[in-house]
Amino acid sequence: MNKQANEVTVSFVESFESYASDSKAIGELKNRLEDARKILEPVIKAHKIPVDDNKAWKEKRVIFFPLVQTLELPIDDNGNKMDLDAISQTERKKMDARIAAWLGVIRTCLEYQILPTDKNADRLRKARLWTGLNGNGKVNPNWIDPKAPKIEAHVIQETTSVPTVTASSVVTETKGEPKTPPKAPSVSAATPQKASEPVHPLTSNVSSPDAPLSAREHCGILLDQLFKNEAFRGEFAPILAMCLDSNVATVTRCLVEARDAMLNGKGVK
């Protein structure tokens, strides 16, 4: 029993020491990150550029290139930065690759106003989470990939009653002469939708808790809208009457009567 107790005690002490040491290291790392964040945030904000704006980036690249180049210069045997002339061609290619990688990360940070949490610009852009410039290094969900397929919001449409258009309301005759009545206020089938969503034309194939519109009902609503349209009454109806060698009153009355017969199920046999 004493041997087991001693083993547990030793394991506890070792774990305690490891936890205490790691906690101290993590605390020091957090302080380093916080100090770096306080320096980075104002610089990134001050040099913000539009996404994919190459001209704007070229202007900023002139500022950051010499700084990154100095950072990536190899160290000689004495611990000093080497001169560019003293660097071999092979080492120079490696250094240029590291510089290009850092410049890509810096550009990404300037464009999206985020902190550099990855040395690879492509991985940084595609990261699921971003550390934003919000004064506390808070982690935020990443942007929505513009190349991802867009999911169109399904608009639920509800049918609304539209005043029935009759032949007498469209065309009146006085003393045997057809006359067009005063312009009536435009009435359309209202479809309640969210203001931010595009307005789609009414269709007979809709999803609604109520029974969907039949093709006949849908056609009747569209005809009602057509007969109240100013361009139809002032331009198209006269042209149609001329083509049929008739007059506007007769043509319009026939259209309305045909619409009524259709809705009443009195089609051509």
Image: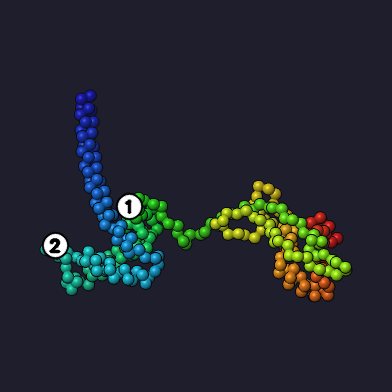
Q: Is residue 102 visible?
A: yes
Label 2 SS: loop
Label 1 SS: loop
- Extreme top residue here? 1
Specify whether 26 is left or right of 140. left
Front one among 145 and 60:
60
- Tell me the residue that label 2 is attached to: 79
Specify whether 35 is left or right of 79. right
- Tell me the residue that label 1 is attached to: 135
**Residue 110 figure quarter:** bottom left
Q: Amino acid at mark 1?
A: Gly
Q: Amino acid at mark 2?
A: Gly
Q: Position of residue 257 (x, y in %)?
A: 82, 61
- Extreme left residue here? 78
Q: Is residue 105 visible?
A: no
Write the residue at 79% across / 67% down: 180
- C-alpha span from label 1 to label 2: 36 Å
Q: Position of residue 175 (x, y in %)?
A: 88, 68
| 265 lies above or below 6 | below
Specify whether 219 is left or right of 176. left
**Residue 199 figure quarter:** bottom right
Q: Earlier in the sequence, mark 1 or mark 2?
A: 2
Q: Quadrant of the N terminus?
A: top left
Q: Residues within 10 Å of mark 2 (few under 14, many from 20)?
A: few
Write the residue at 39% across / 52% down: 140
